[in-house]
Amino acid sequence: MADIGYISLLLALVITLYGVIAGIWGQRARWPSMVESARRALYAYAILVSISTLALWYLLLTDDFSVVYVAGHSERALPTFYKFAALWGGQEGSLLFWAFILGLYVTAAAALLRERHPEFNAYVYAILHSIASFFIALLIFAANPFAPVSPVPPDGSGLNPLLQNYWMVVHPIGLYLGYIGFTIPFAYAMAALLSGHLGNAWVRTIRRWTLVPWMFLSIGILMGSQWAYMELGWGGYWAWDPVENASFMPWLTGTAFLHSIMIQERRGMLKVWNVVLIFLTFWLTILGTFITRSGVIESVHSFALSNIGPMFFAFLAILLFGFLYVLFTRWPLLRSENNLDAIVSRETTFLLNNVILATIAFTTLLGTTWPILSELFTNEKLAVSAPFFNKVNGPIFAALLFLLGVCPLLPWRRATWQALRYQLQWPFIGALLTAILVFALGERRWWPIAGLATAGLVFMTLVQEFIRGTRARMHTTNEPPWTALLNLFKRNQRRYGGYVVHLGVVLMALGIIGNSFYQIENQGALEVGETLSIGPYVLRYDGLFERRESNYTAVVAHLTVFRDGQEIGVLEPTRNLYDKRPEQPTTEVAVRFGLREDLYVVLAGWEQGGKLASFKVYINPLMSWLWIGGLVLVLGTLVAWWPRPRRVAKPVRVPRSAVPTA
């Protein structure tokens, strides 16, 4: 089976290299059959890489420890659920999974977009084959997932304990579907540049093909945050580490692109900016993979010794300089058709939105790569941590949230004073009332008041837009309110789906503000029967017990929870001790979720056989709204993406007598 998987990779490399040549040759020679051959080669690539992926899955599920990857990332006692997920639990497997997901995307694009752009489809196929060939070359020459091991061990060393969590089974799938999905819009943007067909047609084609990976990337980031919240035991959900930042940066530039293409479609502006944004989004996905897989963050020296690091670096350089060359040769074709008519307009706020998102992406990139830059130029490794990112990006996020409330209210081209007053009065009243309420509840710090007031402004903006749109439809169609609102969504899914996404962002902002400014923490060592107080809660320690699982022992603490003197439940924080890696115990926190606040308990340690145990306890206000807001954001994306059925004209039979004669 390992031989089948490896031979499939070799054939896939041959196919992708052929596809590059066939695509370019077919475009230059105007040879339709050669272009069609390049398109069909994408299907062949997808089939071959799927065979290779299935082969590795088979090896993992059947405990074939004759393969290095299986021996290093699985064991006989590992539950089947995690054997399946071990495919992306290590470097070689995750790169193969990347190639597999790319095969799914290129198959869908080759089948669904075949007729859309015959003027440059050949370039699209050549670019997709080029990217695929890079990843296949990585797998063959630098990270072979089918490398044999000798002598064959009787058992494997097991999967990293931190990955043995249900969120880590689904979270990487979301990230990969997001990362790799941006390959399709990038290929179409580059093909439009290479061919010189730089109107708005390619933008309309790839809008939905950008929304899909953006949605999956959002899901992946949210699930990763949930994993960090439930598994790491520090009371938070986002630590600004390189892996998190690697997924966040392309999300930011992808968000900017989805907003700015609306200006190109409507006004013929920001053409250069849009091409740059979609390139950066794809390039940052490759850069993020390079940062997290090459060893360059640990040290530039480990990068130099890495098998895949130099190959990734060369690929990034080729992408960057190749794009810049093509961009400057096509610059005259990217002139804007219009200019900004006024400072106060929707176009201006969209542009500011893009500048803010790009600024956050740049500061995140700078902070993430600072250890590399400092070691490279000073031979001393310096790193920045969460406080840097929070202080720099926090105010920028506040400005971005403010724009979410203002932008939908401004008209295109130019806003008059009367229109501004009509549109902004209720949102600003909502912000003012929110600030007064927060102040009356005892808050005196400026930042949380400003943050919650801004959230109030955006929420009131969205309510106003929904109410006014529904009323206008009721007036013109005499529909009842709920029917009018539903039809409003059906008639303009893109606009109102975007509003639902903005609503999700507001709800997420509540969770972020609650965790950042109002978290309460306490800790203590308790003997059996003793209690620990935090806020309105009292926790009584009732003892420790063990539970045996397939490949680990769970040490579970039993805590009875009281609020205002009344027993309200039991929490059981846990530590898992893995047989293969006892030096890497994992924390399984116990959380009592609520719309108002979460009670979050961590078992930090124990002595004397459990007679004495230490705990960390947090109250995280409004945290549930972060996850609720994420679900609303995904729902809004689906609404904006969902294709509307096309109206088909029905033929009408006209009586012969009704046809006029000459």
Image (cartoon, grey):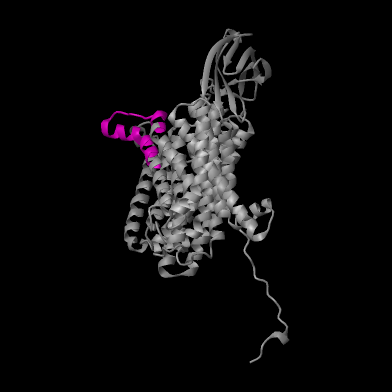
Residue 84: horizontal and vertical position, in percent? 60, 37
Quadrant placement of the C terminus? bottom right
Q: Is residue 439 left or right of residue 490?
A: left
Q: Is residue 498 visible?
A: yes
Identify which residue is drawn at 68% across, 56% down.
479
Residue 613 part of the magenta-drawn span: no
Q: Which residue corresponds to the image point at 38% horizontal and 54% vertical from the top-left?
A: 273
Above or below — where is 482 with respect to 231? below
Q: Quadrant of residue 357?
A: top left
Expressed as whole percent of the image width and height from the top left, the position of residue 661 reads 66, 90
**What span is colored magenta in the figure?**
361-390
| Residue 500 visible in rendering | no
Please tell me whether the stretch drawn in magenta is mainly helix, strand or loop: helix
Q: Residue furthest left?
A: 378
| Image-based side of 397 in relation to 568, left or right | left
Instruction: Between residue 5 and residue 567, name the one nearer to us.
Output: 567
Residue at the farthest bottom position: 662
State left or right for residue 556 relative to residue 183: right
What residue lies at 56% left-to-right and 31% top-to-bottom?
Answer: 623
